[in-house]
């Protein structure tokens, strides 16, 4: 069975003199809020609405199983409440309205709606440019869930329409511009939209958008040369490169990227209350594959080893110290390449260094000095005698 859900977009109820700001060590009344779309607006919304999810979850029993059945997703002042029982969703609406009144904010009626993700004339809902909906499937297409429906998240029709209009507007405004100028304006738009939608089911939509992009660029080219045939226009503005025969590019190599070139990468939910500011370098380095405090070499090795030590196989934890180790030491001919590198705990690295030192009969950083005993003496002299038998010490 699908889930009932409830979407809310909050708005301010009007600023009064009860809102104060600190200016020159004195509180001053404010009569206007942050402009819509301001860079600090999402931050202020997060601060103002912090704790709303906790309040909503109080309407269900405190057991872990029941808590998981109630889903609350919020992004700035947009949020969704999801539950399989419609009564719980309606109760969540009442709790939310009462909680928002206490901070001087109210729900926006025209943007507040209730829908079912599987049933009804228009199942599913749009949220942040995505369409979340459940589709009925056959008995042998239920996947791992074993249910008769499957949940798919796709770019919403409104987001697709807006993207098409933006592409067409750019092409129309560059009717007389050089091909390279048009490409330089379209590429950032295409790349940004695809990166935003690459985590959902977008492959077919990317293909449809490439077809639309071909149509508007072809009309752009034909309009510039109404007296030329199609073959001439094609040779002037399209070039063969790689496996593609139709690349919209100029003679200097400026190439129009395609939507379908973007790789689909599924989003992995952030664990609990984890934050990039909590100092857990291991978790966020593996997740983001970048960190100002961790080198790119370490990040690649973390990803290659799936967060595990190359020697003991134990996952790295927050606070662990690591070292980059050459699998085959450079002194024995090992290369400084990724296929010869591994990330180890510092203590695992020390143990491996000792072992390598004993095998080589010498030390690395003063660890693992091993010498064969003298043939006559049981002790190990620091310096051996010369061939004539004279001591060097």
Image (cartoon, rainbow, N blue to C red):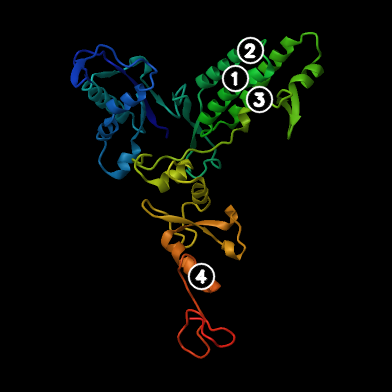
Q: Position of residue 180 (x, y in %)?
A: 67, 20
Under circle 4, the secondary element is helix
Q: Quadrant of residue 42?
A: top left
Give the Cα separation between the discs numbered 4 and 3: 55 Å
Q: Are marks 3 and 1 in contact (CB under 8 Å)?
A: no
Q: Vertical placement of 293 versus 212: above or below?
A: below
Under circle 2, the secondary element is loop
Residue tagged by mark 4? 357
Residue at 62% over, 31% down:
260
The tag on residue 185 is 1
Q: Are marks 1 and 2 in contact (CB under 8 Å)?
A: yes
In this orientation, which residue lies closer to the viewer: 7 or 267? 267
Work out whether mark 1 precedes mark 2 in sequence or the reverse, and give the earlier one. 2
233 left or right of 76 in image: right
Work out whether mark 4 precedes mark 2 in sequence or the reverse, and give the earlier one. 2
Work out whether mark 3 precedes mark 1 in sequence or the reverse, and give the earlier one. 1
Q: Position of residue 367 (x, y in %)?
A: 45, 69
Answer few, some or many: residues within 10 Å of disc 4's Cα (few below 14, many 20 plus, some between 14 and 19): some
Nearer the observer: mark 4 or 3; the answer is 4
Under circle 3, the secondary element is loop
Nearer the observer: mark 4 or 2; the answer is 4
Give the Cα separation between the discs numbered 2 and 3: 15 Å
Q: Is residue 328 visible?
A: no
Give the Cα separation between the discs numbered 1 and 4: 59 Å
Give the Cα separation between the discs numbered 1 and 2: 9 Å
Residue tagged by mark 3? 256
């Amino acid at each position: 069975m699908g889930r009932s859900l409830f979407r809310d977009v909050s708005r301010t109820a009007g600023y009064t003199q009860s809102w104060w700001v600190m200016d020159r060590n004195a509180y001053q009344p404010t009569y206007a809020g942050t402009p819509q779309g301001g860079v600090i607006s999402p931050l202020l919304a997060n601060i103002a609405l912090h704790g709303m999810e906790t309040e909503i979850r109080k309407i269900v029993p405190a057991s872990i199983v029941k808590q998981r059945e109630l889903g609350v997703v919020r992004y700035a002042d947009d949020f969704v409440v999801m539950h399989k029982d419609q009564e719980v969703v309606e109760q969540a609406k009442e709790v939310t309205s009462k909680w928002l009144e206490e901070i001087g904010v109210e729900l926006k009626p025209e943007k507040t709606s209730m829908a079912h993700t599987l049933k009804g004339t228009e199942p599913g809902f749009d949220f942040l440019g995505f369409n979340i909906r459940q589709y009925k499937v056959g008995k042998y297409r239920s996947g791992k869930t074993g249910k008769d429906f499957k949940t798919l998240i796709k770019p919403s029709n409104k987001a697709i329409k807006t993207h098409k209009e933006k592409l067409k507007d750019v092409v129309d405004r560059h009717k007389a511009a050089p091909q390279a100028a048009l490409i330089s304006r379209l590429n950032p738009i295409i790349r940004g939209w695809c990166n935003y939608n690459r985590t959902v089911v977008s492959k077919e939509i990317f293909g449809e958008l490439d077809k639309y992009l071909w149509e508007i660029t072809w009309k752009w080219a034909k309009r510039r040369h109404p007296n030329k045939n199609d073959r001439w226009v094609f040779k002037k503005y399209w070039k063969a490169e790689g496996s593609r025969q139709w690349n919209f590019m100029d003679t200097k190599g400026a190439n129009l990227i395609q939507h379908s070139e973007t790789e689909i990468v599924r989003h992995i939910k952030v664990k609990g209350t984890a934050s990039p500011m909590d100092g857990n370098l291991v978790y966020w380095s593996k997740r983001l594959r970048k960190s100002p405090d961790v080198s790119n070499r370490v990040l690649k090795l973390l990803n290659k080893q799936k967060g595990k030590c190359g020697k003991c196989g134990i996952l790295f934890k927050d606070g662990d110290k690591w070292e980059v180790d050459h699998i085959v030491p450079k002194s024995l001919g090992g290369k400084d390449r990724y296929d010869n590198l591994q990330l180890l705990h510092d203590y695992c690295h020390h143990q491996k260094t000792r072992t390598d030192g004993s095998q080589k009969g010498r030390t690395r950083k003063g660890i693992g000095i091993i010498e064969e005993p003298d043939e006559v003496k049981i002790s190990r002299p620091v310096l051996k005698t010369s061939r004539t038998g004279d001591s060097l010490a």
